[in-house]
Amino acid sequence: MSDKNNGKKRQKKLTCRVDFTPMVDMNMLLITFFMLCTSLSKPQTMEISMPSNDKNITDQDRSKVKASQAITLLLAENDRVFYYTGLPNYKDPKSLKESSYHADGIRKFLLSHNIEATAKVEQLKLDKQNKKITEEQYSQKLNEIKGGKDTPTVIIKAMGTASYKNLVDALDEMQICNIGKYVIDNITPEDKAFIKSFEKVSGSSQKSAN
Amino acid sequence: MGRAQIKKKDIFIDMTAMSDVTVLLLTFFMLTSTFVKKEPVEITTPASVSEIKIPEKNILSILVDPHGKVFMSLSQRDDMTAVLQSMGQAYGITFTPKEIKKFAAAPTFGVPIRSMKQFLNLPDNQQDAVLKDQGIPTDSVDNQFKSWVRLAHAQNPDLRIAIKADSKTPYSVIKKVMNSLQDLKENRYNLITSLKTASDEKNKK
């Protein structure tokens, strides 16, 4: 008798346990599916606004760029980048400089032309970190600094052979160097000839050095 | 007998906790992730420091592959049907309801409008293979890309344009796309990039 009772009790204990193994199997399968078919991070974007090519705009509406504050970047093939300041002096190939996308290349040059604004932005970022100003005030002031009078204006001219990555890198530098005024422009044949004459000069100087 | 029963009980592992964990993970993945859209060509976007996220709704994305082929996708299904119909009207092609339904189901489109009807009547598995070699014409003689953008914008005025191009694409191709957008007075748009990591910076140095 006692033996039978014992057996019954044990059986009851067994039935109240549910086996979760299939459930776990199924869940693992679903997790694998989700991990493979979805992406966790949303892609980043960069907002740009291009100048309108409306011909009705009068010269008054156009903001003239002061020659002393203009920097022109020329993006060429094979990740090469050239720059000149102010108005181009096509006759003197030495006014064109070659640089690179490295941190100590074009970035160093742009930052050195934008010291004031960079210092202001750094201060602003500190203020935001210490919660002295709100997010709204921050973005408003950031725009003010970037659009300030003494900040340089950068004109980006890409050659057809430059890659899309070069363009994005150049736009990236604008953001890093806190330059608010920049424009993407079409490259002119003069600019192309400028690069060619520069290459001739630098090539011959290298030869003479050798 | 008694001994054997005890042994059987020992093998039984309690999976309740394990199941709790997996359900938790599953919920996390379901809530945080977004589905990957199938794209006809593989595109590696260039890295940038920009941290602006792209909105999910009202997006017209333009895919540009390294060889200059252009594909488009719209985030809203009902926009797609309307745009196809107006595009058909503009080019004098009428689509059957079945074809329109098939068009709306596709994640990306990018065939010249004249071969659109033929393309939509292909079986699904062949469509993918064909789409890879097609692309929307962007040349100045027959700029269908421009018409697509114009009609899509007329259909949904809140539409934002996002360009997703491969990092190796030559600028001349991008310029063609940008010029078309400029002609349409679409002067504000987004460039899709991926986040630059610290290791990317180091590699550059």
Image (cartoon, coloured by chain):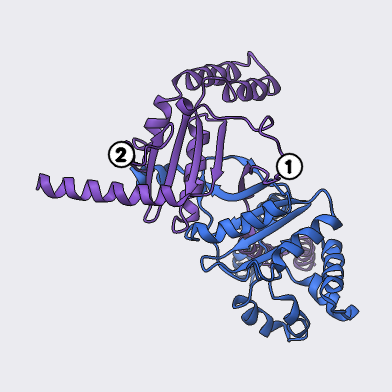
Chain colours: A purple, B blue
The image position of residue B176, as x and y in percent, is 59, 59
Q: Is residue A67 left or right of residue A8?
A: left
Image quadrant where residue B113 sits: bottom right
Reading the image, the residue beneath label 2 is A92
Give the image location of residue B19, x and y in percent. Answer: 68, 57
On the rendered structure, is B116 left or right of A91?
right
Q: Residue, x 69% and y 75% (percent of image)?
A: B111
Point 39% across, 25% down: residue: A112
Say which element carries label 2. Answer: loop
Amino acid type, mark 1: Asn
Residue sticking out furthest to the right: B97
**The furthest residue to the top:** A132
In the image shown, does A185 or A193 lie closer to the viewer? A193
Q: Residues within 10 Å of mark 1 (few under 14, many from 20)?
A: few
Which labelled disc corresponds to residue A147? Answer: none
The image shows residue B78, relative to residue B113, as above or below, that is: above
In the foreground, B100 or B51: B100
User: Which residue has dot 1 on it?
Assistant: A56
Is there one chain holding both mark 1 and mark 2? yes
Location of residue B134 (image quadrant): bottom right
Q: Say whether residue A29 is visible.
A: no
Q: Chain of mark 1?
A: A
Quadrant (top left/top right/bottom left/bottom right) for the C terminus of chain B? top left
Q: Residue at x 59, y 78 (%)?
A: B133
Mark closer to the chain start, 1 or 2: 1
Q: Amino acid at mark 2?
A: Asp
Q: In the figure, B29 relative to A59: above or below?
A: below
Along the viewing direction, whichever of B123 and B177 lies nearer the viewer: B177
